[in-house]
Image (cartoon, helix red, strand yellow):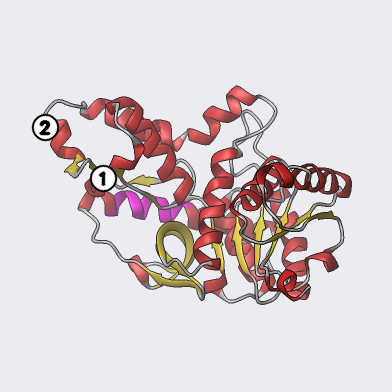
């Protein structure tokens, strides 16, 4: 029994498509025991049981339970939040704000009571504002609450580039910063393909500037493109994989540099706001914000993105003045 108790406890709040996929990936990676929480308890129980029944085939030996009771989430090491309403066709991230603020307030109160020492990853949209609200509602340390967005946006960008250049994704280094949404900033000056700067590939005629701009635009609309195809839902495989990468870096103290929505206190000239920047995630949570030297154009785009996040947070404060 003692060995069983040594395993980490990972709670997933929201047993929708992302929650279920997170549970499956965590089980396959054997990262820890999983509690799948949802107000629709039956959905959480059904998905947990379904994944658990694959354990003899996949060879993982972890506990998976579904619940609608916060007590079952007590003393979690990691909590990943996907609870909220997903975007529907024609809906902006801003439309989601009012609905998801109410949901996140309840979640924050639940976490505060049951797992005040957890590392909390937020995936609920509109991401930057919801993660900021979560921190304020819960009062948990700012280095223990982060938002998942930059990894997903960067992954989309790298994938689109790899398809265009017909080169494998592991040969491309790049990342996306700023707010998660239409103002995100693809860091073109830091983008390398097989060791070459992307600007060099443009000069060599391997990719046109217009095509590159098109890929940046497609990345910004990456979520909306999937919503359009699915009609009744939004992306979940890539968002779940991105959330798991953050959890794994924390649980295994990998100290990976990952683009995430993190609290800034002066870094990049930004104060008291959650924004997508590269951070180091280790066993203490957000161990460091990595400050990159931005080109003039990148700085302009980044500042524009910050402004959009701040404006959306101001809208949130109008909805709930306690923020």
- How many residues crowd around disc 2 within 10 Å: few (fewer than 14), some, or many (20 or more)? few
Relative to 116, say whether 268 is above or below.
above
- Picture coordinates of residue 148, whole percent (x, y): 53, 54
User: Which of the two residues, 17 or 295, is positioned nearer the viewer here?
Assistant: 17
Dominant secondary-structure state across the stretch colored magenta:
helix
Q: Is residue 144 left or right of residue 155?
A: right
Toward which corner of the image does residue 77 lie, by quadrant? bottom right
Relative to 215, say whether 306 is above or below.
below
**Quadrant of the image containing the N terminus:** bottom right
Q: Which residue is mark 2?
A: 203
- Picture coordinates of residue 19, whole percent (x, y): 69, 47
Distance CA(mark 1)–CA(mark 2)? 14 Å
Mark number displayed over residue 23: none
Relative to 303, say whether 226 is above or below.
above
Which portion, as a residue range, is magenta? 299-308
Mark number displayed over residue 191: 1
Q: Earlier in the sequence, mark 1 or mark 2?
A: 1
> Element at badge 2?
helix
**Quadrant of the image containing the C terminus:** bottom right
Relative to 140, say whether 243 is above or below.
above
């Amino acid at each position: 029994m003692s060995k069983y108790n040594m395993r980490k406890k990972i709670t997933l709040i929201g047993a929708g498509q992302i929650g279920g996929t997170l549970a499956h990936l965590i089980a396959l990676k054997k990262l820890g025991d999983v509690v799948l929480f949802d107000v629709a308890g039956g959905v959480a129980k059904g998905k947990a049981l379904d994944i658990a029944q694959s354990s003899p085939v996949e060879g993982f030996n972890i506990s998976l339970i579904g619940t609608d009771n916060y007590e079952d989430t007590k003393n979690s090491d990691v909590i990943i939040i996907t609870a909220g309403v997903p975007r529907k066709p024609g809906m902006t991230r801003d439309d989601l704000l009012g609905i998801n603020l109410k949901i996140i307030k309840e979640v924050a109160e639940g976490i505060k009571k049951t797992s005040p020492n957890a590392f909390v990853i937020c995936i609920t949209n509109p991401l930057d504002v919801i993660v900021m609200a979560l921190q304020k509602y819960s009062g948990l340390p700012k280095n223990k609450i982060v938002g998942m967005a930059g990894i997903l946006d960067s992954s989309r960008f790298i994938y689109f580039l790899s398809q265009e250049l017909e080169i494998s994704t592991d040969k491309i280094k790049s990342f996306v910063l700023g707010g998660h949404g239409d103002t995100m900033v693809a860091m073109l000056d830091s983008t390398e393909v097989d060791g070459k700067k992307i600007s060099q590939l443009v000069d060599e005629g391997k990719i046109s500037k217009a095509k590159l701009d098109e890929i940046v635009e497609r990345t910004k609309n990456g979520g909306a493109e999937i919503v359009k195809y699915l009609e009744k839902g939004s992306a979940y495989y890539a968002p779940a994989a991105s959330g798991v990468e953050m959890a794994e870096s924390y649980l295994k103290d990998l100290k990976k540099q990952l683009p995430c929505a993190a609290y800034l206190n002066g870094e990049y000239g930004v104060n008291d706001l959650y924004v997508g920047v590269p951070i180091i995630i280790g066993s203490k949570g957000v161990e460091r914000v990595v400050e990159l030297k931005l080109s003039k154009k990148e700085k302009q785009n980044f500042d524009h993105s910050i402004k959009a996040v701040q404006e959306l947070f101001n809208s949130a404060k109008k909805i709930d003045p306690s923020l």
